[in-house]
Image: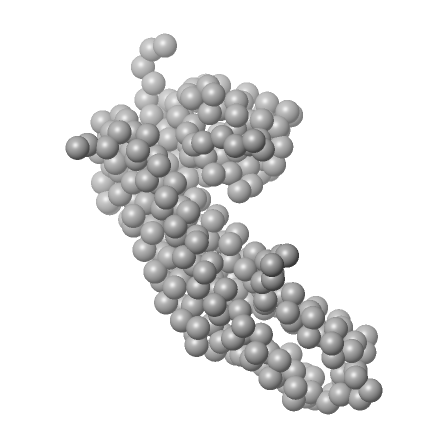
Amino acid sequence: MAKSFNQIILDGDHIFDNSETQLQRSLQSAESIIYDELIKLLNTVDVSAGRLQTNSKVENFLMSMDKRIYDALKKADYNNSVLKYTKNFSLLTDNIQNLHSKFSGINITDAQIDPFLKLEVNSTIDKLTGSGMAKDFINPIRESLYRNIMLGAEVTTVEKTIRDFVVTSAKSDSKLLRYVKQVSRDSIQQFDGIVQANIAQELGLNAKRYVGSLIQDSRKQCVRWVDDGVIMLDDLQSEIDWAFANGSGMNPATTIFTFDIFRGGYNCRHRSIPFNFVGK
């Protein structure tokens, strides 16, 4: 039996949710390994009266962190989990094609999506395992530890700093998990948005269908757009202006050209599906 448009939307939601969950579980299993490796490294540093001593061993500790973290992630099979996560981009490609075929009778080819697919997959891998991880996670933890050590922090304080960065507790996610959550959520949703925006521009489509479920704390603009269902391209700028004036959480980079990407703001779980609206 052919799937309905709403079922295809739900399939897309499941792709988003499952891809994030799988990667986050993999990372959490790696956290204890990373913590243990950093504590082993910390134990090589000289201590006097419970405080770390600033010397060459401290420098070696700080400069060796990258390798220890990357080795621990590899040991926990995190890199393979990232590659598995990126396979969801191909599943989402199928979902996008099904959406447009079902709703508008538009045939979106692999050739129209592949350039964006390759670019986003490579960018995501870099953010989760390469220079992005270094810039947005490893460098901040090194800087935080450096400040502690230069101020003559106690060993227990430094250990807590490491724990806060890499170990998730019942009360809060680690900074590492928050980073991976953000990247994994944004990457696949922005891939969807970039493809949708390109389809809209390439085919000259004149409207957006704003879809997704509403919850108690859904933003005003999302409630408005889901209830309306359809946003005409001619009205889109005024709707964006309304959201900035009356709603919350909008990304400042949101324009009529980036609306499909940023939608209702940071961490928005809705989708903007461009189509050609004929008559009212």
As drawn, is 53 to the left or to the right of 90?
Answer: right
- The residue sitting at 49% across, 24% down in the picture is 225
Quadrant containing the N terminus is top left
As drawn, is 247 to the left or to the right of 111?
Answer: right
Whether 160 is drawn above or below 45: the answer is above
Q: Where in the figure is residue 46, as x and y percent of width and height? A: 73, 89
As drawn, is 65 to the left or to the right of 21?
Answer: right
Q: Can you name the residue that lies furthest to the top here?
A: 280
Camera-nearest residue between 26 and 189: 26
Q: Can you name the residue that lies furthest to the front here?
A: 170
- The residue sitting at 69% across, 84% down in the picture is 58
Residue 255 visible within the image: no
Quadrant containing the C terminus is top left
As drawn, is 242 to the left or to the right of 193?
Answer: right
- The residue sitting at 65% across, 71% down in the picture is 162
Q: Quadrant of residue 82?
A: bottom left
Camera-nearest residue between 84 and 257: 84
Q: Where in the figure is residue 215, as x and y percent of width and height? A: 52, 32
Q: Where in the figure is residue 57, as x and y percent of width and height? A: 68, 88
Whether 218 is drawn above or below 129: the answer is above
Q: How is the image coloured?
A: one colour
- The residue sitting at 43% across, 76% down in the picture is 75
Q: Where in the figure is residue 212, as x and y percent of width and height? A: 43, 32
Task: Please tell me how many numbered marks the rendered image carries.
Answer: 0
Residue 60 visible within the image: yes
Camera-nearest residue between 7 and 175: 7
